[in-house]
Amino acid sequence: MNNFRESRCSISAVLLLFLLQGSRAADVHVHKAVGDSLDLIADYPKEGLVEVRWIYSGKDFAVYEKDQIKPLNPPLFQKRLKLYKDNISITLLDLKLQDSGRFTIVAEGKSVQHPTKVFVLHVHDLIRDVQIEVSNSWRESKNMCVFHLRCVSSGDLNPSYSWSGDLVRSGQNQNISLHPAESATVSCTANNTVSIKSTNQTVVCTGKGTSVPSGTGFDLKYLLIAVGAGVVVVVILGASLAVFCKRRRRTGQDESRDGITVYEDVNTDGVAKKRPESVKGMSIYETVDDLKVTQNMPQTLYDKINFQRHPAAGAGAQTSSSYQEVL
């Protein structure tokens, strides 16, 4: 009798577990890029629907009841929830890496428990750039260049890498060996579920100790052109400076030989002209002395007045003023 009861209990537990599993749909994995949006649609019939809850990592963040949706716990997805009035759904905007996790939608009716929906969100960063880093070495025993290739990308921290061209392999690091004068072109692709980017690289083995990757960094020919242009500019500037200094020196010698000064250029006519050789080196004072008027002309204010005086008063002479008579 006890065994029969135990069997009935076991059967009941199995049936209950089956019913619970049946009320829960399989997890849906969703992959999104940073900045995308996630739709959480509760497509249940409204008739007899009592409540719908949206849950993220065990926390309710929105609820539908009495024919309307309202947010709960605002700090969880503040200003990033879009609520709808015409259907029972929510959209999470501007996804971030930290939004990755489990979203659950639980719906209860008046007489039925609707299946629970589970969305497992995976948010990925976009792959922004891909480059191939190249280093090389010379293998003396085989007379070959060995190139060490590493594919690196920015954005997603854990993308998948694949190679094509002369290398059909996978993985982030690859090696390739070439004999002198041989070259190889490889392509690396970085991808995740939301983005993909590729880049190409050509490497050339130019001989012992001189194996050079092609297409990376600053090309040698451009470096040589830049150096040559710099040398030409320096030569032109040096020649121009030498000519200028030579002309400056010659001009200074000519001026010192002529002995012309600002004082020597001034004459009574106020016109600048070259002075004769006999008066070279004269100062302004000597020039003024040469240009003096004759001694018969008045030289000072007093002399001018004296020249206009009447002759000294004598016997019977008439004077022009009483002062002159007294004198």
Image (spheres, rainbow, N blue to C red):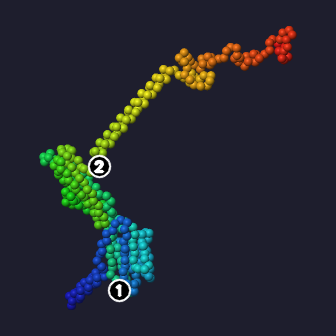
Identify which residue is drawn at 42% across, 27% down.
246
Q: Are marks 2 and 1 in contact (CB under 8 Å)?
A: no
Query: Is residue 13 something one can see in this rendering?
Result: no
Identify which residue is drawn at 36% across, 38% down.
233
Q: Nearer the viewer, residue 79 or 20?
A: 79
Q: Nearer the viewer, residue 6 or 22?
A: 22
Identify which residue is drawn at 37% across, 77% down.
41
Q: Nearer the viewer, residue 174 or 198?
A: 198
Query: Is residue 288 something one can see in this rendering?
Result: yes
**Left or right side of 191 for 265:** right
**Left or right side of 263 for 256:** left
Query: Residue 133 at what x, y percent from top left?
Result: 26, 53
Query: Residue 195 at what x, y percent from top left?
Result: 30, 64
Question: In which quadrant will I find the N terminus?
Answer: bottom left
Q: Amino acid at mark 1?
A: Val
Question: In which quadrant will I find the C terminus?
Answer: top right
Report which residue position mark 2 lands on: 217
Report which residue position mark 1 lands on: 112
Query: Residue 189 at what x, y percent from top left?
Result: 26, 60
| Closer to the eye: label 2 or 1 | 2
**For marks 2 and 1 on the same chain, the one whose residue lies earlier in the sequence:** 1
Identify which residue is drawn at 33% across, 70% down.
121
Judging from the image, what secondary structure is the residue with disc 1 in? loop
Q: Nearer the viewer, residue 29 or 12?
A: 29
Judging from the image, what secondary structure is the residue with disc 2 in? loop
**Left or right side of 137 for 223:** right
